[in-house]
Image (cartoon, grey):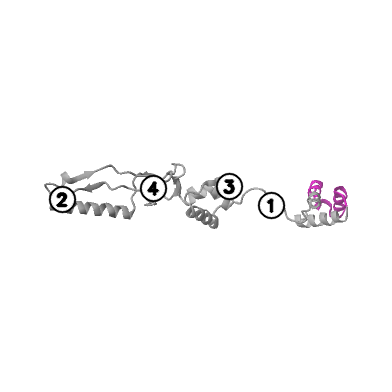
Amino acid sequence: MMNKIEARSVIKFLHLKGNNARQIHDEMKAVYGDESPSYDMVVRWKRNFQSGHMSLTDKPRAGRPSIKDDLAMVKKVEAVILDDRRSTMEKVMAETGLSYGTAWRIIHEELHRNKVSACWVPRLLTALQKQTRHDFSQQNLTLLERNEDNFFACLVTKDECWVYLYDPDTKEMSKEWKHPSSPPPSQGGEDPEICQENDAVHFLG
């Protein structure tokens, strides 16, 4: 039996001579006998040449590449996730060219990651806000030591007011890819420019 490339070369040559599929098949049958390709194969490759596909190799097939044990593809998926931990499966598929099932297997079975929602912390304070609270407490302790009898009579308290200048992410929007050994994500009023806290304690006196 002729190998595929040899048979396609002969078909291409006879096609360029102007022969139709039947003529090509008959001529190859006369020269190569039982080793000649089938008539269906001659028709298929003549159509390829007529459509402009003059290569002797097969056209690229539809579908996505297999990445079984492909460490380079695993690293590519990991890079997409680390660049944006809120990446969706659609984004991972678009940037890697993988099918949903393959991308899912790499993320869950190779990288051992799951997507979890951020834990909502209403008053997640910055380091500056924590230090401010500490300073206020120290000042009040000093005043208490100076005038313990009248300290509480001079102390005025009021509710704290948190004014948000943005809409917090929904549970679905906050989902991030997380490794089992990583701490859970959290969200809250953590930016001094996002929320403003009024003083909770005033001392009169």
Q: Which mark is residue 60?
A: 1
Q: Tell me residue 159's x, y (percent).
A: 28, 42
Q: Which residue is mark 3?
A: 99
Q: Tell me residue 153's x, y (percent).
A: 16, 44
- Residue 164 seen in this snapshot: yes
Q: Earlier in the sequence, mark 1 or mark 3?
A: 1
Question: From mark 2 to mark 3, how far is it between C-alphas?
Answer: 67 Å
The answer to if 89 sits in the magenta stretch is: no
- Foreground mark, 2 or 1, reads 2
Q: Earlier in the sequence, mark 4 or mark 3?
A: 3
Q: Which residue is mark 4?
A: 186
Three-letter amino acid code at the position of disc 3: Ser
Residue, far left: 149
In the image, is 58 to the left or to the right of 104?
Answer: right
**Residue depicted at x 24% and y 54%:** 135
Three-letter amino acid code at the position of disc 1: Pro
Q: Tell me residue 10's x, y (percent).
A: 82, 56
Q: Are marks 2 and 3 in contact (CB under 8 Å)?
A: no
Per the image, label 4 sits on a secondary structure element best described as strand
Mark 4 Cα-neighbour bin, 10 Å: few <14, some 14–19, many ≥20: few
Q: Are marks 1 and 3 in contact (CB under 8 Å)?
A: no
Q: Which residue is mark 2?
A: 144
